[in-house]
Structures are given as C-alpha cells and as structure tokens.
Image (cartoon, rainbow, N blue to C red):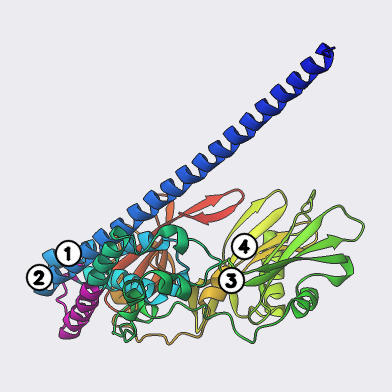
Amino acid sequence: MLDLKNSHKDRRVFLIVLVLAIGIVAALWYAYNEKNNYKLAMENQYNMEFYELLDYVKNVQNYLAKSLISSTPEHGAETLTQVWREANLASAALSQLPILTDELSKTEKFLNQVSDYSYALSRKNIYDESLTEDDFKNLEELHTYSIDLENTLNQLALDFQGGNINWEDLNNKDIPFAQEVSNMSLDSFSNIEQNFEKYEGLIYDGAFSEHITTTEQVGLTGDEIDEETAKNRIYNFFDGNKIEEIISNGFIENGNIKSYDFTIRIKNEDNVANISISQKGGHLVFLNYNRDVNVENISHEDAVQKGKEYLNNVGFENMQETYYLSQEGILTINYAYKQDDVVMYPDLVKVKVALDNGEILGVESTGYLNSHRERELKTPGITIEEAKMNLNPDLEILSEGKAVIPTEWKTEIECYEFKGRVQDTDFLVYINIENGREEDILVIVNTPNGTLTI
C-alpha cells in the first residue's frame, strides 16, 4: 500500500532542496556578476586615468614647446604656468594607476621636476625677468624627454587596445612587476622607465634649485634599527617610572616616515600613550599621552621653557618657540630650528605641555625629520633697510629678522621677516633677501588662548 505520508515528506524535502539549490545558484550568479561588474568598473576607471595621463603628457609636451619660442615674459609666464598645471595633473593621474610607485619612480621624478621647474621660471617671468640661456637649455631637455614619454604612452595605448595588457593582472600585487610586464608587453610598459635611465634631474641656480632634485628625508640621520632597539629608545622620550607595559603595534611602512608604533600602558591609570620611533636613526616621530589637566599651575612662559628643555634633551637642539595655543590645560607650542639667527620654519616640531606640572604630553616632529639640515645661507642681495622699502608704508614694524620659509611646492626661500601692525591687526611679511620680492604675508591672530597665524 502506498505510504502517502512519506511521499508528501519526500516531496517537501525535494522542494526545500530545490529551493536551496536555486538560491545557491542565484547567489553564485549574483556574486559572479558583481565580480564582473566590479572588474569592469575598475578596468574603466584605470583606462580613464591612463588616457588622462596621456592627455596631460601631450599638453606638457605642447606647452614646453611653446615656452621655447616665447618672446615676452608675460606670455612665458602664462605658458609655463600651464606646464606646471598639466605636469601636476599628469603626476596625479600616474599615481592612480595600479602600479607600485617604485616601479615608475623615474617617471614620477621627471613629472615632479617639470612641475617645479616650470613654476620657478614662471615666477621669473612674472617679475619681468628674462630667461637665461641655461633656462632654455633645461626647457629643451625637458621637452625632449616629454616627447619620448608621450611616444611610449601612445604605444602603450595601442597595447591596451590590442589586448596585450590588462589592468587586472597589473593590479595583482602577488605577481612581481617584472613578471607582469614580461607576461604582457615588456617592450612598451618597461620603456616608460627606460626613457629616464639617463635622466638625473636638473641642477640650476635659483631660489628653488636644491629642492628640484632632493626628495629624501634629510633630517633622518643614523643607521636603521630593529623593533627591539626602538622599544628600548622609548625610555629616552617618555618617563620610565610611569610605564607599566609597552605593546608593539608593528612596523608602519606606508606612512610619511617608516617607523615602529607602540602603545604604552600607564601605571595606576586607565590612560595609554602612543609613540612612534623611526626605523632610520631611532628618532622620535610622534608621541601622544591623553590625560586630563584640571588645573593650571605654571605660566605659558614656563611651559615654553619646559618644552624647549625637553627637545634639547631628546636631540632637537637650538629650537625657538614661534606660535602656541592653549586648550583645556594643555599648551601646544610650535618650535622651529634656528641657525645663525635665522629661523628655519620648515624644521618644525610641535610639543604639548601640561599646564598643571609641565609634563610633556605630545610631540610631532615630521616636519623637522623631513627637512632638517645645516643650510648654506645665502649672501643677501639687498640689505634689510632696502627690504623695508618694499613694505607697505602704513606697516608699523615691531620686530625684524631673517627666516627660511617653506612653500606649498616643497621648496624654501630665505627672507627678511618683519612683524608689524596696521590698524590694530598684526602681520608677518616675508621679503626675499636676494631680490626684494614679497614672498608671503601672514595675519597674526592673538586670542585669549594663544597666538596663531593664517
């Protein structure tokens, strides 16, 4: 006799299995489609960045060609400004491609130098200075290399169109770059870097010259150290009597400065401190210890002095306070290195001092470690009295001196620094010591909590 009960049960099981199977197939199909859609989207994104790079390089080549025949400073400034803009955009597009930075470092260096150099020359034109014979030789050299780069990128575009190269393989970081290239089109992709095998960078006289070819972190001195050595260095920078435990957070390789990162557990407190020690030289890169400061027992002047003493003890010597801000019982002070009575603003260290007992609660030294070195100071082309002739006559001068200031293009300019006042507003004015140009103006904001500049 037919067992209807078991028959219904088997049918129900079958239907459940069928529904699950359909669901799994649908999920797999959805995942497959999503993966393909993602791959397609990434492929389109990389193609867009590549062709933008090609367009920017073409523009660089065209504007460099125009700069070689420009006959007036006005037109030269306009053309060189376009070179600067397009080279910057090319460098940005290059950085978006799925290729390790080291593999195209020479190409990146070339584009950065084109940008920096064209900016420097455009400033000469803006100030109605004619370009020298050496300037035009340098521009001609850059133009020649830009033609080679454009030709190589055009060939690479053909390889993409022909299917010889695909971005998915290039984006696979498990495959060595040389293997990626050899598997697809060695003669086209590797030629990008081969264009610059003999390119060593420009060397020229001018306010921006030394920064055109220097990108290393010159303040990082000494040999490389291991994690255990870095851990032991912590006691040089933080009060050992407060340390209960030091926990390693690993090696930070992708930051501005390669460093070992640690967390410090504080005795008898729930608070912790974070500290980073550079791999090269074992320098203090970063320190932050958050604790409440409920009373203010020391003056700002005493806190500034304690910060300076701390910096001197941990290897940052000849530092001068510049500006500060007081918040919630903590004074944050900017210190700049001083060489021969010249304030080096690029060599900056920020320090947090507790106003209850003068304890150092924070340090950030990235600017100093990137930039610090003994500079070869220039012989002024104008006197400080001549520089004053270029100031607004309404500026009441309160103090004067010399300073090296950084620019947003990662260059430096040596200036006369004038602090002055116009209609109850304080300013800092920077006049180039070589040619009397007004390089920068900052507004000094005096608040109840401190002194800032904008």
- Residue furthest out toward the front: 1
- Residue furthest out toward the right: 268
Q: Which residues are magenta?
A: 125-148
Q: Residues within 10 Å of mark 1 (few under 14, many from 20)?
A: many
Secondary structure of the residue carrying numbered label 2: loop
The residue identified by callout 1 is 79
Which badge, 2 or 4, is on the more N-terminal residue?
A: 2
Measured along the vertical axis of the image, is residue 435 above or below residue 6? below
Which badge, 2 or 3, is on the more N-terminal residue?
A: 2
Front one among 342 and 113:
113
Mark 4–mark 3 Cα distance, whole angstroms, equals 22 Å
The residue identified by callout 3 is 257
**Residue 422 in view in this figure:** no
Q: Give me the residue at 12% from left, 68% from top.
A: 66
Secondary structure of the residue carrying numbered label 4: strand
Q: Residues within 10 Å of mark 3 (few under 14, many from 20)?
A: some
Which badge, 4 or 1, is on the more N-terminal residue?
A: 1
The residue identified by callout 4 is 333
Secondary structure of the residue carrying numbered label 3: loop
Query: Mark 2 touching mark 4, by CB under 8 A?
Result: no
Mark 1–mark 3 Cα distance, whole angstroms, equals 36 Å
Amino acid, disc 1: Thr
The residue identified by callout 2 is 70
Residue 316: x, y in percent?
Answer: 64, 78
Q: Does residue 255 appear to the left or right of 227 in the view shown?
A: left
Residue 144 in the magenta stretch? The answer is yes
Between disc 4 and disc 3, the foreground one is: 3
Measured along the vertical axis of the image, is residue 86 above or below residue 24? below
Q: Give me the residue at 88% from left, 55% from top.
A: 269
Residue 234: x, y in percent?
Answer: 77, 73
Please tell me in which quadrant of the rendered image residue 113 appears.
bottom left
Residue 384 in the magenta stretch? The answer is no
